[in-house]
Amino acid sequence: MHRALRRPLPEGVAPPWRRPAERPSPASRVPWRSTLFLALFVTAGSHFAAEGQPGRVPLDVYARLLLLAGPALLLLRLRLPRFTAFAVAGVCLVYLAAGYPYGPVFLSVVVAVFSAVVSGHRVAAWSALGVLWVGHLIAGLWLYAWLPPGGDAGVSFGQELVVGAWLVAVVPVAELARVRRGQWAHEREERARAEQRRADEERLRIARELHDVLAHSISVINVQAGVGLALLDADPEQARTALTTIKSASKEALGEVRHVLDTLRTPGAAPRAPAPGLQQLPDLVEHAASAGLRVGTRSGGEPVPLLPGADLAAFRIVQEALTNVVRHSAARTARVGLAYRPGTLEITVEDDGPASAGDGASGGNGLAGMRERAAVLGGTLEAGTRPDGGFRVRALLPIGRPGDDGAPRGGNS
């Protein structure tokens, strides 16, 4: 029994025990893979660079510890980007002031500054590079006589300018990466918002379809149920007719609801039955008659085949307008008018009123749904009381022949 009560998950949704865990935020991650690779590269590269610099202090245990200290500090670059930039620059400055060979030790500084800029701490990145360059400038121009290696002649100011230019070149590259990263984040947000809008529009479309189908059919069922109850003893044959109408209306409603749900279960698949359109207007008039509403129809202009979206919207607007007459008006007659004009279809649904006691046509979602259907196609809809009593719904829908280049704005409803 418990298995039968389980609801199947929607298509494409994995069960909870198979869903991937939430990804941690970037700041909570430790970039140990890239840091390990950088530590190995800096250590090996410095070893080979030392062979071509016999005048510098040979690499010893302290030098290798300094070479590993820079990459080790980079493990904190996502959580503490400003601290990491200054700390790595300080380690690099101590390494160079100790007279050890030049080499890929600067890569740790580049990565630290790059991370600081990308995370938005540009002042800290510039300051760390400034501290490194000024420290190297002081050591190379004035303190070289007291620093290892012994007998070092120092460096020229021109050489220091080259070093400074190389360090400054790191920042524009990091700025470019920061801007590009921001663009990617903006594009991801735009895609997410677009997907959310499509999902909201699809939910709204389904809600309109279900509302129109169920409101019309249930209104017919409600009227016939009242007739059946009133005549059950006095006129059993008439009560039987009312029950037959209820059965027919409920069967048709179930069929249309199944049609809407099939489009959800198999997105992209061709529907089993064509969508309703104005060609089913006689059936709609017949259903309204079964609810006690006599509907007269008239058509003006030259009828043209409608695009599927416009055809469905026109049918649903007429259906909902007649449903509102049944539910909210004491009138027993209504008129439906279709006026075909170049590029436009005018729909009018009128009744002579008055409104039912304690009720009004403005309640519920019917009028809002009709306006939404018209707006999706780029049309308009007006609804309100007539000067001589009653209620009128008037819609103007842009139309085109199937195969035209123009399509309804906003897609099919």
Image: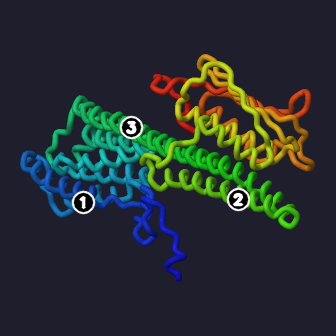
- Above or below for 238 versus 131: below
Of residues 268 and 63, the one nearer the viewer is 268
Looking at the image, residue 98 sits to the left or right of residue 87; the answer is left
Frontmost of labels 3 and 2 is 2
Looking at the image, residue 202 sits to the left or right of residue 371; the answer is left
From the image, tell me which residue sits under label 1: 36
The quadrant of the image that shows the C terminus is top right
Residue drawn at x 72%, y 31% is: 297
From the image, tell me which residue sits under label 3: 180
In percent of width and height, residue 209 lies at: 62, 47
In the structure shown, which secondary structural element does the residue marked by tag 1 occupy? Answer: helix
In percent of width and height, residue 173 lies at: 33, 36
Amino acid type of the residue that numbered disc 2 sits on in the rendered structure = Thr
In percent of width and height, residue 37 lies at: 22, 57
In the structure shown, which secondary structural element does the residue marked by tag 2 occupy? Answer: helix
Disc 3 or 1, which lies upstream in sequence? 1
From the image, tell me which residue sits under label 2: 244
Which label is found at residue 44? none
- Above or below for 128 versus 6: above
Q: Do the residues labelled 1 and 2 touch (CB within 8 Å)?
A: no
Frontmost of labels 1 and 2 is 2
Looking at the image, residue 345 sits to the left or right of residue 91; the answer is right
Q: How is the image coloured?
A: rainbow
In the structure shown, which secondary structural element does the residue marked by tag 3 occupy? Answer: helix
10 Å crowding of disc 2: few (<14), some (14-19), many (20+): some
Amino acid type of the residue that numbered disc 1 sits on in the rendered structure = Leu
Residue at far top of view? 342
In percent of width and height, residue 295 lies at: 76, 37
Q: From where the camera sits, is residue 24 visible? A: no
Residue drawn at x 23%, y 29% is: 158
Q: Distance between the residues labelled 1 and 2?
A: 79 Å
Of residues 321 and 226, the one nearer the viewer is 226
